[in-house]
Image (cartoon, rainbow, N blue to C red):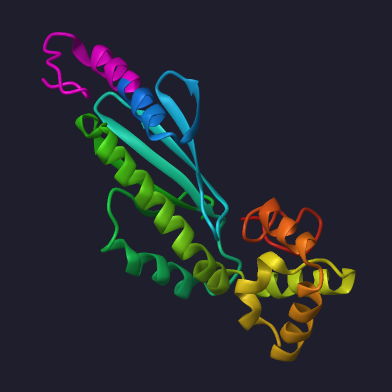
Amino acid sequence: MTGAAGTGTSGTGTAGTSAAASGELRAVLSSLGVEFSSPRDEAFLVRLEGQHKLATMTWLIVGAHSLHIEAFFCRQPDENHAAFYRFLLERGGRMYGVHFALDPAGDVYLVGRLPLMSITAAEIDRVLGCVLSYSDDNFDPALMLGFASSIRREWAWRVRRGESLANLRPFARLVDQDTADDAAAGDAAAGDAAAGDAAAGDAVPDAGARPGLRT
């Protein structure tokens, strides 16, 4: 059979093929210049930076016969479940390499499988680009469908405390327009502090004990 690097590996067995594929994947990721770690030989965790979802952590795991791809998208929605899941399913027919899926808790992931022979620089670059695009482009619309109440509570919490709304601006349509306009005007005056806040976490940061989202 043909190994991941395109060289003959007949007679080496599954273990040899997997080991070769892992080595090839490590070399490919290094050549692409992406940020990754490898907690074990066959598993690679890649950080993909976006604009809406600031980081999509993506697992690439070499198996006996295929490469498994998995990236966390967001936790299970708080509300509006039918519209939320319909939104994701409608995108499935246009996706490449990965698709939206749920774990037993209802949290949403991007998952997929590719043959080991797909471990080439061009194909891994394409798949990672797709993961980033699907995660980043769909993040804000999905949150507006499944987490509108949480976003409104987070907005009100920040307004009461005089905190920046910089990374909540994409969701301004979910709150009263007069409130949104007043808050945006005050937030703009914060200047660099607001920009720093926007870069500090995900599109909606981990709220801890506060009423925000944990996505």
Percent position of residue 207, x then y:
75, 57
**Residue that extends furthest to the top in the rendered view of this protein:** 11
* Foreground pick, 48 / 87: 48
Residue at 75%, 73% in the rendered image: 155
Percent position of residue 135, x then y:
46, 56
Q: Please tell me in which quadrant of the rendered image residue 158 appears.
A: bottom right
Residue at 62%, 60% in the rendered image: 203
Percent position of residue 163, x then y:
83, 66
Count up the numbered dots.
Answer: 0
* Foreground pick, 189 / 85: 189
Quarter of the image for the C terminus: give it: bottom right
Compared with 47, 174 (above or below) is below
Is residue 3 highlighted in magenta? Answer: yes
Q: Please tell me in which quadrant of the rendered image residue 127 appears.
A: top left
Percent position of residue 54, x then y:
57, 53
Task: Answer yes or no: is residue 89 visible.
Answer: yes
Range covered by the magenta-colored residues: 1-23
Q: Is residue 11 left or right of residue 161?
A: left
Residue at 34%, 18% in the rendered image: 23
Quarter of the image for the N terminus: give it: top left
Compared with 30, 150 (above or below) is below
Task: Answer yes or no: is residue 112 visible.
Answer: no
